[in-house]
Image (cartoon, rainbow, N blue to C red):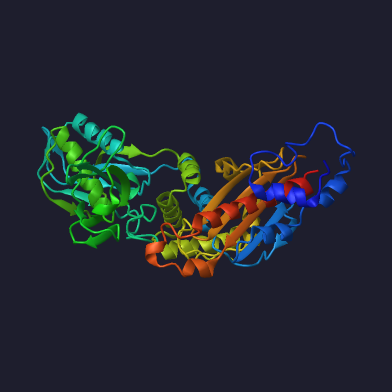
Amino acid sequence: MTLTRRAMMAGLLAGAAQPVLANAPATSPRPLARDPELRKALIPSAGDLVDAANLGGRVSFAVADAGTGEILESRAPLLPQPPASTAKALTTLYGLDALGPDFRFATRLVATGPLVDGRLEGDLILAGGGDPTLDTDALGDMAAALKEAGLREITGTFRIWTGALPEVREVDAEQPDHVAYNPSISGLNLNFNRVYFGWERTKDTYEVSIEARDARFRPGVSVAQMEVVDRRTPVYTYTDTGDADAWTVARGALGGGGARWLPVRRPALYAAEVFRTLARSHGIQLGQETGRAQSDEGEVLVEHLSAPLSDILRDMMEYSTNLTAEIVGLTASRRRMGEVPTLAASAGHMSGWLGETMLARSAAFEDHSGLGDDSRISAADMVKAMVKAGPDSRLRDLMKPFPVEAMPGVEVAAKTGTLNFVSALTGFETAPNGRELAFAIFCADVPRRDALAPSQRERPEGGRYWIGRSRNLQRALLARWGGLYGA
């Protein structure tokens, strides 16, 4: 078998699990090329790979020596492109710089008066510190600890404090109402600000449940409500009643049974309702009213601390949780700025920090997660940030492996990013010879994305196929660079 440029390009773009030469015969009528320079000459050009992917839109990339910052190859490197969730890599750098890897979010139960014989003479405040990972089980543990502290009832009002962060109704107003990856943000969050909607068919009707579901506790909630209606489309509708999130779901879409997570637009009240239920299970009476606290001052009766920031960021990078990215970015901005009036203001501050500290002067973000349509950065500037962080950095340690089967010996740690007709990848590549590379690849068909109606945005026609081809192109480019610069 003769290794040709055409065969190598076909292998690189196939996305197959085997190396290009995996099925080569044991003997050959002519010797295989062993000259590294000849093998390099057979590697398809980046332009050929991009043309063969046939994505439409714009493809831009840059790859650099991670030690020196020297750009080795690029295509439209100065073109500002949507970063999608690769923005989370930059938010990670921003958060670690401002807060440090050992930072922990605190959620507290605060008393405004003395505790006498099981009675609190004052208000009890559930004070959020912005923890994006607070869940129902943690609130259950806090309720149990409050019982251990001796509290049975309060004379004042049960209140919530959310002043640690601004309240944001949704990250991106252009997303469908029912997608849980477009969360609300508050200083007091719960279960990634989602509720668990379950349904089961019983004869001619459906039994539905709305729960703050977790591993140990599954209290029902009223802050979100669901009604099954006779229609085929739309699948979901949403109405803000002023007191609750009111959902309807089309009966024809439910089938025999199932479940999904829905976003909560009142996260602080959601957390308050769940805590009240869990406290009642321990015999603690908090009354019927939930008030707003103007401050979090008072005696701390119970405190729950999150995992260290480095652990939170590792999970964020693995599961690409938008709420975590937004809260880490907002908390970092608050540490730097004092007050953070809006999400856009915080994202703008991060953009400025990236320009000054990472020399990424094209960075223009409207959020910290990459969910918004209008965030932009160039491939060259994304690579500058990767080089500045360094191949042995904490950032690389927090990234996930990205397999490149077509080039054995290549190791890649990266952050992916996906929106409708947008696919991005950034990170570090270790070539077979040990050379460290930093890279960014952006594929975006913005006009095709912008043409989608709101009803098409959850599963657009042709979207999965387009994303699959873009991922194959990214792997092919990484294989090219591993062979070209790692021989």
Q: Nearer the viewer, residue 399 or 145?
A: 399
**Residue positioned 56% across, 49% down in the render:** 415
In the image, taking residue 443 as reference, residue 321 lies left or right, namely left
Q: Position of residue 287 (x, y in %)?
A: 10, 45
**In the displayed structure image, the side of residue 236 where residue 438 appears, left or right:** right
Q: Quadrant of the C terminus?
A: top right
Q: Position of residue 175 (x, y in %)?
A: 39, 62
Q: Percent from the top left, x then y, of residue 237?
A: 26, 60
- Number of marks present in the image shown: 0
Q: Indicate left or right for 146 with 1 as reference.
A: left
Residue at x-position 83% and y-position 43%: 2
Q: Nearer the viewer, residue 461 or 164?
A: 461
Q: Position of residue 249 (x, y in %)?
A: 25, 55
Q: Is residue 16 visible?
A: yes
Above or below residue 32? Residue 6 is: below
Query: Going 12% across and 50% down the picture, which residue do you hit?
Result: 289
Q: Quadrant of residue 58?
A: bottom right
